[in-house]
Amino acid sequence: MRISHAAARDRIITKFPQSYRQTTPYEETDFDSRVRDACLANKTGTVGLQVSKVIVVGDVSVGKTCLVNRFCHEVFDRDYKATIGVDFEVERFDILGVPFNLQLWDTAGQERFKCIAAAYYRGAHVVVIVFDMKEAYTLDHVKRWHQEALLENKHDPHIFLVGTKRDLCETPKEIEQVETAAMQVAEEIKAEYWSVSSLSGLNVEEFFNRLAAITFNSSVLKVLDDMDAKSASRQIAIEDSSNNRIKLKPDDVDGRSSSKRKKAACCN
C-alpha cells in the first residue's frame, strides 16, 4: 500500500456541477435547500470536517491510477506501473464554505492483489468503476466489480461508471458506440456514466467535482437528519417526563397532605 497526499489546496465549489449525460440515477441539479441554509448558518461546523471515502476499481491497466493522478496532481505518466495493493490520496474541497475531503483509494486490478484491495472496500461512500473504452472486455467485467464492491458495503454507496482513454477512440461514431453500450450497463447497475481522457484531462475535473458535490450534499443531509432525530428524541423525553411528573394538591407541602401532617403533630 502506498500513501500520498495531494498538494495542499482547496477546490472551491459554489455551483452544483451537472452530469455528463442526462440519464443518471442522481437527479440533483443543485444543493438541497437545507444544505445551503445549514452551510450559510455554519451549522455543519458542529460535526466537524465532512469526509467521503471513494474506492476506484476495475481491470488491470484500464487507467485507474492515471485518472486519480490527473485529478490530484495534474500529471499524466506514460510509463505505466501496476498498482501494488492500494494507493491512497486525499483531495481537499471547499464546498459552500465548508471543508470537505475526498479520500481516494486506488485499488489494484490484478487478481493476486484482489484480496488485499477488497479489505479497503468497506465503508466506501462512493464506488468508481473504471473501464477502457478501447477494450470491450473491460466493460464486460464491470458488473463483477460492482458486485464485489457492494459485498463489502452494508449501506448503498453512490456508483459511477467511468470510461477512460477516450482520446484513443478514432472517430465520434466509435465513441458513440462505446458510450451506448456503457450507458446500458450503467443503467443496470444504477450508476452515473462519464467518459474521460486522463491524457488531455477531458472531463476529469468535471467528473470529480460532480462526485464531490453529490457526496457532500448527501453527507450534510445525513448530518442534518441525525441532528433532527436527536432533537426530536430529546423533545419526546422532556414531554414524557412532564406528563409523568407527580402533581401535588394545593395544601400539599413537601409531599405530605395536611391531614397527614395533623396526624403526625398529634402523635408528637
Image (tube, helix red, strand yellow):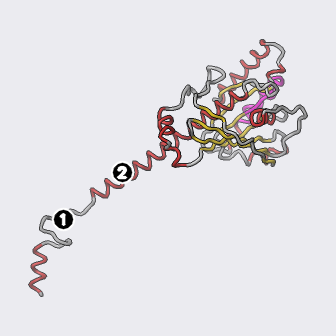
Q: Residue visible at 73% across and 33% down?
A: 129
Which quadrant holds residue 107?
Answer: top right
Q: Is residue 190 above or below residue 171?
A: below
Left or right, 230 with reference to 152: left
Name the residue furthest bottom. 268
- Horizontal side of 95 relative to 1 (left or right) equals left
Q: Is residue 99 above or below residue 241?
A: above
Question: Residue 170 magenta-drawn?
Answer: no
Name the residue carrying label 2.
235
Q: Which residue is mark 1?
A: 248
Instruction: Tell me, yes or no, whether the highlighted magenta stretch contains residue 142.
Output: yes
Which quarter of the figure has residue 50?
top right
Circle 2: residue type: Gln
Which residue is at the front of the view, 178 or 29? 29
Task: Kindly give the residue lying farthest to the front in the view shown.
Answer: 9
Residue 264: numbered disc:
none
Residue shown at 77% from the left, 26% from the top: 201
Q: Bounds of the magenta span?
A: 129-146
Viewer-nearest residue: 60 or 258:
258
Q: Position of residue 87 (x, y in %)?
A: 79, 44
